[in-house]
Image: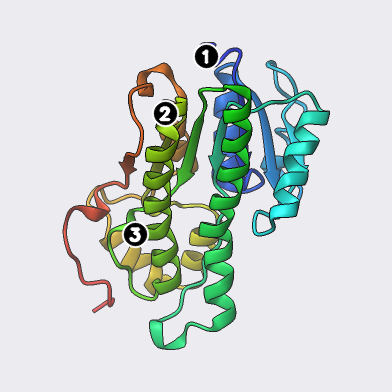
């Protein structure tokens, strides 16, 4: 692969998961120095990424994106390691499916604290450092096609992703004078992580999910990573406050998600 990202340093939060590790691997292959941050250390396929890079070893740093102190400590640790990210991919996420009538306070708070507050905290800490250093950087949010389309039993998740889309647009407007681009990557239904776990456990959910995809196939983590890569390349230099929708057509039309 090419070295289009040579000289760039990229931080991926939620980097121990399927999407984060796929992005880290691809960005590394294109020449970036990559660090991953997560509440838990990488394991399995994601764990094998660490120390295997030709662009400098992919490093893991612990973080709880829900806590400002933890996020500040993450960036201090990056400083100590000699890493100054010019691109941040806010990818840490949480999902719990339940109908509106059954959403608990804990599930609501957990979903919004990870998916929305976590991106606010990481984005703000990173942007303040970029502004202070004069870095014309990039911040990417992992959104979702459901940021605009309500999904059955997805009240807390859909709300968090819709809020994230607006957060990114507000950030983009305020940070544009500093040359910092902020955009959202909105995947569809990915055959990975918690979505795959739910589909494996609930055949009706899997049937419903496939019915919602006009292209008729689930999305791979690598396909999401390709979109993230493009948003990091010079080709995306003039894009800010935008959503790159890569959802297999899920958002094209209304469908019956009831399974009937």
Q: Residues within 10 Å of mark 3 (few under 14, many from 20)?
A: many
Q: Which mark is residue 126?
A: none
* Residues at marks 3 and 1 touching, judged by CB atoms closer than 8 Å: no
- Please tell me which residue is depicted at 39% across the width and 65% down the height of the picture: 158
- Please tell me which residue is depicted at 69% across the width and 54% down the height of the picture: 68
- Please tell me which residue is depicted at 27% across the width and 77% down the height of the picture: 258
Q: Position of residue 185 (x, y in %)?
A: 40, 42
Q: Which mark is residue 1?
A: 1
Which residue is the site of mark 3? 146
Which residue is the site of mark 2? 177
Q: Which of marks 1 and 2 is nearer the N terminus?
A: 1
Compare residues 170 and 19 and report the one nearer the observer: 170
Q: Where is residue 35 in the image (x, y as percent from the top left)?
A: 69, 32
Side of 73 where 87 appears, left or right:
left
Q: Which of marks 3 and 1 is nearer the N terminus?
A: 1
Image quadrant where residue 3 sits? top right
Q: Position of residue 147 (x, y in %)?
A: 34, 58
State how far apart marks 2 and 3 are (Cα): 30 Å
Q: Residue most toward the left?
A: 253
């Amino acid at each position: 692969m090419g070295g289009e990202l040579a000289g760039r340093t990229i931080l991926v939060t939620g980097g121990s998961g399927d999407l984060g590790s796929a992005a880290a691997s691809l960005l590394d292959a294109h020449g970036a120095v990559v660090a991953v941050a997560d509440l838990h250390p990488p394991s399995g396929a994601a764990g094998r990424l660490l120390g295997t890079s030709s662009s400098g070893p992919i490093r893991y740093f612990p973080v709880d994106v829900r806590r400002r102190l933890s996020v500040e400590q993450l960036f201090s640790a990056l400083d100590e390691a000699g890493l100054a990210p010019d691109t941040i991919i806010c990818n840490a996420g949480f999902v719990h499916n339940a109908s509106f009538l059954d959403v608990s306070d804990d599930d609501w708070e957990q979903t919004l604290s990870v998916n929305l507050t976590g991106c606010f905290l990481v984005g703000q800490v990173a942007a303040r450092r970029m502004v202070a250093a004069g870095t014309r950087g990039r911040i990417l949010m992992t959104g979702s096609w459901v940021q605009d389309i309500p999904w059955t039993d997805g009240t807390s998740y859909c709300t968090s992703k819709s809020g994230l889309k607006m957060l990114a647009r507000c950030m983009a407007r305020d940070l544009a004078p500093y040359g910092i681009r902020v955009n959202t990557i909105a995947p569809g239904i990915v055959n990975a992580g918690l979505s795959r776990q739910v589909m494996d456990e609930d055949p009706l959910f899997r049937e419903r999910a496939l019915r919602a995809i006009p292209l008729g196939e689930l999305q791979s983590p690598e396909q999401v990573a390709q979109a993230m890569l493009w948003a990091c390349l010079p080709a995306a230099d003039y894009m800010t406050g935008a959503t790159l929708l890569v959802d297999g057509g899920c958002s094209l039309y209304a469908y019956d998600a009831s399974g009937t």
